[in-house]
Amino acid sequence: MMTQKFDFKKRRAVSNIIGSLIVLAIVASVGSVILFQGLNQINAFNYDLTLHQEERVNELREDIIFEHVRFDPNVALPDGDNLHLYLANIGTVDTTIVSVTVVKIQSQELIFSRVVPAADEAYIAIEDHTEIILDGAMLGVFPDDVWSGGLYGPGFNYKVTVGTAKGNFFSTIVEPYNT
């Protein structure tokens, strides 16, 4: 039998220590690129959340109340079909009204819909109020007795809704009455 001798000095391979250092260098460089890219994405996401959160907070700070809703039951046409909305901003941010709708609840009839009130009516500063006049003559659905009787007078409820530029809607239910 023949025995072979291995000569370790003639072997031409990379030592374990050098191989480990090369692998460590590759992993560290690729890992740091992935880490920094991930951190940049997380920062961008947090920035987007901060912007969204600020808008959402302003939406929550907006609050409007209906001080009074006035029908003109005893006024002759064409002014007798007007509807006056007195709104107050009790929130902590300024408000801009962008839409007003009035729906007759019993029949679900859309009585009035106006997108964007007049400029002086639309903006309500903090702790301020405004009057929005809805001109019923533009509707063409009112009979001669308007709010004082008939199809649109006492005994019928109306849902009045105002929409704001921040996407909030505020509503109240009203009923005309004879004075």
Image (cartoon, rainbow, N blue to C red):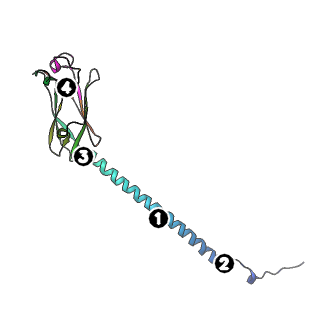
Q: Quadrant of the N terminus?
A: bottom right
Which mark is first along the chain, 1 or 4?
1
In magenta segment, residue 38: no
Amino acid type at mark 4: Gly
Q: Nearer the viewer, mark 4 or mark 1?
A: 4
- The residue where tag 3 is placed is 61
Q: Nearer the viewer, mark 4 or mark 3?
A: 4
Which mark is first along the chain, 3 or 4?
3
Tell me the crowding category of disc 1: few under 14, some 14 to 19, or many 20 or more residues within 10 angstroms, Cα based.
few
> CA separation, marks 1 and 3?
37 Å
Q: Position of residue 94 (x, y in %)?
A: 21, 46
Q: Nearer the viewer, mark 3 or mark 2?
A: 3
Q: Residue at left 16%, top 21%?
A: 147
Question: Observer-nearest residue: 37 or 165?
Answer: 165
* CB within 8 Å, label 4 to label 2: no
Amino acid type at mark 3: Arg
Which mark is first along the chain, 3 or 1?
1
Mark on residue 136?
4
Q: Residue at left 21%, top 17%?
A: 151
Question: Observer-nearest residue: 100 or 8?
Answer: 100
Tell me the crowding category of disc 4: few under 14, some 14 to 19, or many 20 or more residues within 10 angstroms, Cα based.
some
